[in-house]
Amino acid sequence: MRLPLLALLARGPAHGYELKQDLEQLLGSAYPQPNVGQIYVTLGRLEKSGLIEGEDVAQSSRPNKKVYHLTDAGREALRAWFEEPEDEPRVRDEFFMKLALAPQTGLAEQITLINQQRRQYLNTMRQLSKLAAAEDRDNRIAQLLIEGAMLHLQADLDWLERCQEELEELE
């Protein structure tokens, strides 16, 4: 959450609730939305680390609000984030750990685990399809997020099929 908030502040000062709304509008309903408390805690940490600065702004009929802006250090951290490619292959996969350890425990069958996981992925794909249909067609970022998630799920389903074929050959 730190770097996305810095990215939103790169276009100009904003307060926490504004940042939450900007994230929701940008990413749509498919992306898990942070609560405003999480946003303010993160903003406090960013301020403490010198990546942003906050300024109290008086409001006539409401309590003061704190508006944050990016510091030079924050802009540099953001620049470094954009320059660094993501390198997280899914070798630390919780499902695969279950699949690998199931025969040693005698508590679960590998094919049963595969079938359960397949059902979960298919249910998630159905939910994403509903989200895609309900999402504003003009919000291309949200549509791309949903499409990316569905493509990952399809790859996971293909991989489950491969696992099942391999395991059935071993029997």
Image (cartoon, rainbow, N blue to C red):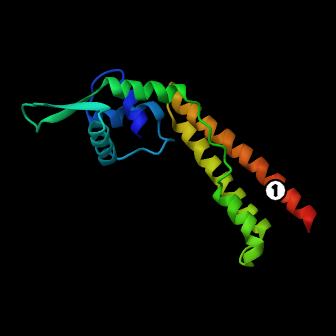
Count of labels in the image? 1
Which residue shows up at 63% across the image and 36% down it?
A: 148
Q: Position of residue 127 (x, y in %)?
A: 59, 48
Query: Who is closer to the viewer here, 91 or 30?
Result: 91
Q: Residue furthest bottom?
A: 106
- Mark 1 element type: helix
Q: Quadrant of the N terminus?
A: top left
Left or right: residue 124 compared with residue 100:
left
Q: On the image, numbered disc 1 is attached to which residue?
A: 163
Above or below for 142 versus 102: above
Which residue shows up at 29% across the image and 48% down it?
A: 37
Above or below for 78 versus 17: above
Under mark 1, the amino acid is: Cys
Which residue shows up at 41% across the image and 32% down it?
A: 25
Q: Quadrant of the C terminus?
A: bottom right
| Quadrant of the rendered image containing residue 95 | bottom right
> Quick check: can you spot residue 159?
yes
Q: Residue furthest left?
A: 60
Q: Position of residue 157 (x, y in %)?
A: 74, 49
Left or right: residue 133 compared with residue 113:
left
Left or right: residue 75 compared with residue 57:
right
Above or below for 105 versus 48: below
| Quadrant of the rendered image containing residue 58 | top left
How packed mark 1 is, by other alpha carbons closer than 10 Å (few <14, some 14-19, many 20 or more), is: some
Q: Position of residue 7 (x, y in %)?
A: 40, 28
